Amino acid sequence: MIRVTCAILKHNNKVLICQRSSSMKLPLKWEFPGGKIEADESKKDCLKREIFEELGTNIRIGEELTMVEYHYPDFSVRLYPFICSIESGTVQPVEHAQIRWVSPGELMNYDWADADIPIVKEYLKLHPLKYT
């Protein structure tokens, strides 16, 4: 079981989503940024480290959402999501094919990695869209 953290990174009423590169597992699927928890590393320390490595920014970690356990055909993942904000730095993708800032209403329009779908749905339930 791979233990992974991910950030629902919010800024100016938008959420950052990342597209996996063609050379990664689950190629070109969309996900929230994050990565594997190392031995003796806390979830929050992992997330701060991974976001800095992947995007070059420091984050403020907020609310933790429900852990997701998902079994792909060739591996299993336990995903720990957190709602976060940028503390400092400018987002610059290092390993993803592309990144996008999207409104919450656009989140379900992307081809997500299966483990991320319950996180998108929980986020939208906790932060319902405001229609005017």
Image (cartoon, rainbow, N blue to C red):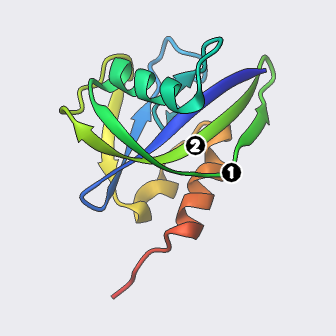
Q: Is residue 28 visible?
A: no
In this picture, residue 35 sits left or right of residue 78: left
* Residue bearing the label numbered 2: 81
Residue shown at the point (43%, 31%) measured from the top left:
19
Residue 104 higher or lower than 72, as above or below: below
In the foreground, 67 or 112: 67
Residue 32 at x, y percent in the picture: 48, 38
How much space separates mark 2 and mark 1, taking CA atoms?
7 Å
Residue 2 at x, y percent in the picture: 71, 20
- Callout 2 touching callout 1 (CB < 8 Å): yes
Residue 111 higher or lower than 71, as above or below: below
**Tag 1's secondary structure?**
loop
Name the residue type under label 1.
Thr
Q: Is residue 86 visible?
A: yes
Residue 98 at x, y percent in the picture: 33, 30
Residue 119 higher or lower than 126, as above or below: above
Residue 68 higher or lower than 26, as above or below: below
**Quadrant of the image containing the C terminus:** bottom left
In this picture, residue 70 sits left or right of residue 93: right
Q: Which mark is residue 66?
A: 1
In the foreground, 96 or 56: 56
Residue 93 at x, y percent in the picture: 29, 24
Residue shown at the point (49%, 69%) measured from the top left:
127
Residue shown at the point (24%, 32%) measured from the top left:
91
**Quadrant of the image containing the N terminus:** top right
Name the residue type under label 2.
Pro
